[in-house]
């Protein structure tokens, strides 16, 4: 079955530690996105990528980094510079055909600070 | 700056009630507006709206877009407890997808 897979489901970070959240899709989608969801604030865009080896900052990119070495994969690293990383992180993908396309979401990763 | 505003932020109703959720937007390069339902984890797609005045319908849910007044509504008739979720509105601005804060709907038996 085609889909988008995030791992792990739960992640704990110690102070000063970098952690990486995985996002893989086998939908052959060109575009991939990372969102952060805090209670009462909806989804905020961290980074997005429309093609391999290229990505753009979203509204809250500070303290995060991404890479897009393969079409299927878009990992997100939460660095020690992100002082308030506790949140629910959602990865999404879509086609990029120039037409309107909906997002497909993964099941998310809940990140907490120890 | 592009923004999407949803109202109300939360809503509690009883089964059988009809609800209307609102989404207003300001974006520089509108392409489409989408509604998603988020029950636990992954948001699931409900509707995509691109043209004004054309209602999209799926069972008890319907939605319509007004591109002149820059808003959309999502209607749910004869609500059921299974409709309890966060409903997210998103606008495609031809670069990325901007989300509103969501409306948390609780349907009581």
Image (cartoon, rainbow, N blue to C red):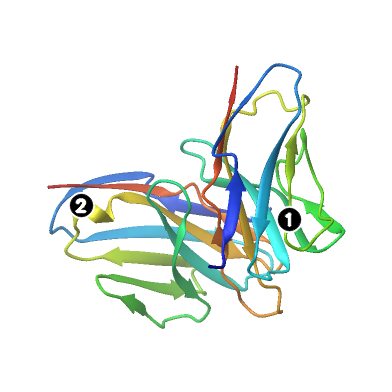
Mark 1 is surrounded, within 10 Å at the Cα level, by few (under 14), some (14 to 19) or many (20 or more) other residues, namely some
Camera-side residue of B41 and A36: B41
Camera-side residue of A52 and B79: A52
Q: Position of residue B24 (x, y in %)?
A: 48, 59
- On residue A65, which mark appears? none
Q: Are marks 2 and 1 in contact (CB under 8 Å)?
A: no
In this picture, is B28 found above or below B43?
Answer: below
Rendered-image quadrant of the C terminus of chain A: top right
Left or right relative to A31: residue A6: left
Q: Residue furthest front?
A: A1
Q: Residue at x 54, y 45 (%)?
A: A108
Give the Cα distance between marks 2 and 1: 37 Å
Q: Position of residue A101 (x, y in %)?
A: 60, 73
Q: Secondary structure at mark 1?
A: loop
User: Which chain hosts label 1?
Assistant: A
Q: Quadrant of residue A62?
A: top right
Q: Position of residue B86 (x, y in %)?
A: 38, 49
Left or right relative to B37: residue A36: right
Q: Residue at x 30, y 66 (%)?
A: B75
User: Which chain hosts label 2?
Assistant: B
- On residue A73, which mark appears? 1
Whether labels 2 and 1 belong to a single chain: the reply is no
In this picture, is B22 found above or below B39?
Answer: below
Residue B62 in sight:
yes
Camera-side residue of B93 and A87: A87
Q: Position of residue A98 (x, y in %)?
A: 71, 79
Residue B70 in sight:
no
Q: Secondary structure at mark 2?
A: helix
Q: Which residue is mark 2?
A: B81
Q: Residue furthest right?
A: A53
């Amino acid at each position: 079955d085609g889909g988008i897979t995030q791992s792990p489901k739960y992640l704990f970070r110690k102070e000063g530690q970098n952690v990486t959240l995985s996002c893989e899709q086998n939908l052959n989608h060109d575009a991939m996105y990372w969102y952060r969801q805090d209670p009462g604030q909806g989804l905020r865009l961290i980074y997005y990528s429309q093609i391999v080896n290229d990505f753009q900052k979203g509204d809250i990119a500070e303290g995060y980094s991404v890479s897009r070495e393969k079409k299927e994969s878009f990992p997100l690293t939460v660095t020690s510079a992100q002082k308030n990383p506790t949140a629910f992180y959602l990865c999404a993908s879509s086609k990029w055909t120039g037409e309107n396309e909906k997002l497909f979401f993964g099941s998310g990763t809940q990140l907490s600070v120890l | 700056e592009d923004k999407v505003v949803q109202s109300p932020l939360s809503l509690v109703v009883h089964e059988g009630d009809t609800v209307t959720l609102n989404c207003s937007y300001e974006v520089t390069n509108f392409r489409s507006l989408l509604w998603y339902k988020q029950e636990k984890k992954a948001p699931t797609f409900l509707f995509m709206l691109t043209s004004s005045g054309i209602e999209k319908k799926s069972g008890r849910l319907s939605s319509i877009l007004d591109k002149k007044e820059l808003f959309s509504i999502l209607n749910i008739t004869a609500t059921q407890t299974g409709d309890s979720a966060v409903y997210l509105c998103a606008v495609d601005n031809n670069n990325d997808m901007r989300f509103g804060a969501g409306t948390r709907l609780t349907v009581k038996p």
